[in-house]
Image (cartoon, rainbow, N blue to C red):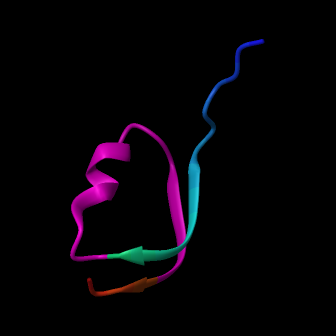
Amino acid sequence: AKGQVAGFSFVIELTGISGMNDLEDYPCSSLMTMPA
């Protein structure tokens, strides 16, 4: 069976790390942000 990524949700987003840039093709959300 195949699936399709709908998006990503994170509890904490570390703003000093540019990991969200790798996911820019998908909707992303986070509950809170903190500096890394």
At x 64%, y 25%, the residue is 4
The image shows residue 24 at horizontal and vertical percentages of 35, 45
Labels in figure, total: 0
Q: Is residue 31 toward the left or the right of residue 24 in the image?
A: right
- The boundaries of the magenta stretch are 15-32
Pick out the residue farthest to the top: 1
The residue at 23%/61% (across/down) is 18
Q: Does the magenta stretch include residue 5?
A: no
Q: Quadrant of residue 25?
A: top left
Q: In which quarter of the image is the C terminus?
A: bottom left
Q: Where, by quadrant of the figure, is residue 1 drawn?
A: top right
Residue at 38% in and 45% down: 23
Tell which residue pokes out farthest to the bottom in this image.
Answer: 34
| Rendered view: 9 above or below 13 | above
Viewed as shown, does residue 15 lie left or right of 30?
A: left
**Does residue 26 belong to the magenta stretch?**
yes
Q: Position of residue 32 (x, y in %)?
A: 50, 84
Task: Look at the picture and state if 31 lies above or below 24.
Answer: below
Residue 5 picture location, percent across and down: 60, 33
Instruction: Establish if 9 lies above or below 32.
Output: above
Name the residue at the right extreme. Answer: 1
Position above or below: 21 against 12? above
